[in-house]
Amino acid sequence: MRGSRPGAEVRAWRPAVAGISEVLHAHFAEHAYPVHTHDTWDLMLLDDGVVDFALDRRRHDATDAGRVVLLPPGVPHDGRSVGGLGFRKRVLYLSTDVLPEGLAGTAVDGPILLDPALHDRVHLLHQALRPPGDGGDVLEAESRLAFVRERLLTHLDRRRTPPREAADHRLAARLRELLDSRVQAGLSLDEATRVLHAHPTHLIRCFTRAYGLPPHTYLTGRRIDRARALLLAGERPVDVAGAVGFYDQAHLSRHFTRHMGVPPARFGRRGTSSYGA
């Protein structure tokens, strides 16, 4: 079996987020994919270089790094670098639970999407989808996936009307109560929508408009507050992490340092400066 091509860098993992079967980050100095199909939707950001591909025997080129490429399930396609410069890409493989297979025809007609808002949403989703062991936030990733799905459906289903935008403060308050009761255990977006009988993106928008930050950020802040209290009581960071809902000490340290400016091991020590509210 031959090794990988020179200059190829590939990182792939399966995130703990329903609907995403694989995350792939790759850099190829030169590479050509043979014609193949997937049983998933392939959502690609081209970060650098030029890619030429054929979808259902029609050739396309994704020359603009600001564009988003969406390849539907079950449709033959290939791909290759252009000009010998290689390319860098990030891909999400989405199940047909996220996007119905019946919308594939629209994607075949227009697989390259010039949509800066969609590009930003997919980029932020990639940032939330950390590999196993890196302390990813599942609620954040689920929330960002919901907004990516919503934006993709506006491209794929022209009959679709956008969800209601009016803030529902009662719904936001109920979600806040639910988050407050699940600070340590955490809460998935799917569970929140089932309990509150709300559309995922509408639920997130209601909460964000009511409280000025999305649910996953609110939950992280509540965990940091609890961590501060335990650290000041003399608990060790390694014990505090699990007690407040972080995966491990590294996960706690990353968020705590971003919030407080010092790692948890230094918080409250004599000689450190005072901190805000």
Image: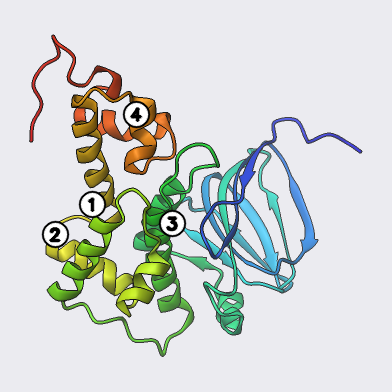
Category of crowding for the residue at label 2, using alpha-carbon neighbours closer than 10 angstroms: few (below 14), some (14–19), many (at least 20): some
Which quadrant of the figure has residue 53? bottom right
Q: Mark 2 points at which residue?
A: 211
Q: In this view, does 222 lie to the left or right of 75?
A: left
Q: At numbered mark 3, what does the secondary structure look like: helix, strand or loop?
A: helix
Q: At numbered mark 2, what does the secondary structure look like: helix, strand or loop?
A: helix
In this rendering, the answer to whether 150 lies above or below 134 is: below
Point 22% across, 39% down: residue: 226
Q: What residue type is labelled 4?
A: Ser
Q: Which comes before the other along the chain, label 2 or label 3?
A: 3
Category of crowding for the residue at label 4, using alpha-carbon neighbours closer than 10 angstroms: few (below 14), some (14–19), many (at least 20): many
Q: Distance between the residues labelled 3 and 1?
A: 21 Å
Which of discs 2 and 3 lies nearer the camera? The answer is: 2
Q: Which amino acid does label 3 sit on?
A: Val
Q: At numbered mark 1, what does the secondary structure look like: helix, strand or loop?
A: helix
Q: Where is residue 47 in the image (x, y as percent from the top left)?
A: 50, 45
